[in-house]
Amino acid sequence: MADVVSMLWIRNWFTSIDYEWLGNRIIVHGHTPVPEISIQHHLENLDKIQTIDIDNGCCFKKDDLNQLCAFDMTNREVVFQRNIEQL
């Protein structure tokens, strides 16, 4: 089991994925805000990379962030909702 610090802060874990163990499953994760264009790229390449980061930084006031993102696993679609609260 990974230590707590690594589980919270590690960012370059993609290279250590055991794809044989993963099989046809998909890793859906967040905790690292990425722009909408990156999420769309992950979605378009989901069969190849088998991971999708759906954290669009809904709490940040930045043009490429500030949205809540949901992933519909059945239909493989992402939905974005801009943060409407005053920050």
Image (tube, helix red, strand yellow):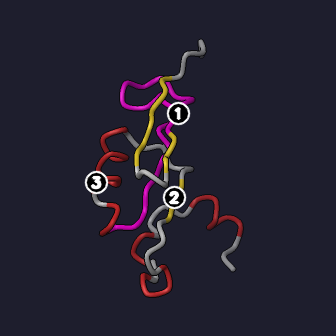
Above or below for 81 versus 56: above
Q: Which residue is mark 1?
A: 68
Residue placed most toward the observer, 29 or 4: 29
Point out the residue furthest to the bottom here. 20
Q: Check disc 3 and give the amino acid type.
A: Glu
Cα separation between marks 2 and 3: 14 Å
Q: Position of residue 23 (x, y in %)?
A: 45, 81
Cα separation between marks 1 and 2: 15 Å
**Residue at figure coordinates x 42%, y 81% from the top left:** 19
- By secondary structure, the bulk of the magenta-drawn segment is best described as loop
**Residue at figure coordinates x 42%, y 25% from the top left:** 62
| Marker disc for residue 44 | 3
Residue placed most toward the observer, 74 or 71: 74
Q: Secondary structure at mark 1?
A: strand
Above or below for 12 versus 72: below
Residue placed most toward the observer, 39 or 31: 39
- Mark 1 or 2 closer to N-term? 2
Cα separation between marks 1 and 3: 19 Å
Magenta stretch in the rendered image: 49-69
- Mark 2 or 3 closer to N-term? 2
Above or below for 24 versus 50: below
Q: Does the magenta portion include 14? A: no
| Marker disc for residue 28 | 2
Q: Position of residue 68 (x, y in %)?
A: 52, 33
In the rendered structure, the answer to whether residue 22 lies left or right of residue 48 reads right
Q: Estimate how packed mark 3 is, as few (under 14), some (14 to 19) or many (20 or more) residues with alpha carbons within 10 Å.
A: some
Q: Estimate how packed mark 1 is, as few (under 14), some (14 to 19) or many (20 or more) residues with alpha carbons within 10 Å.
A: some
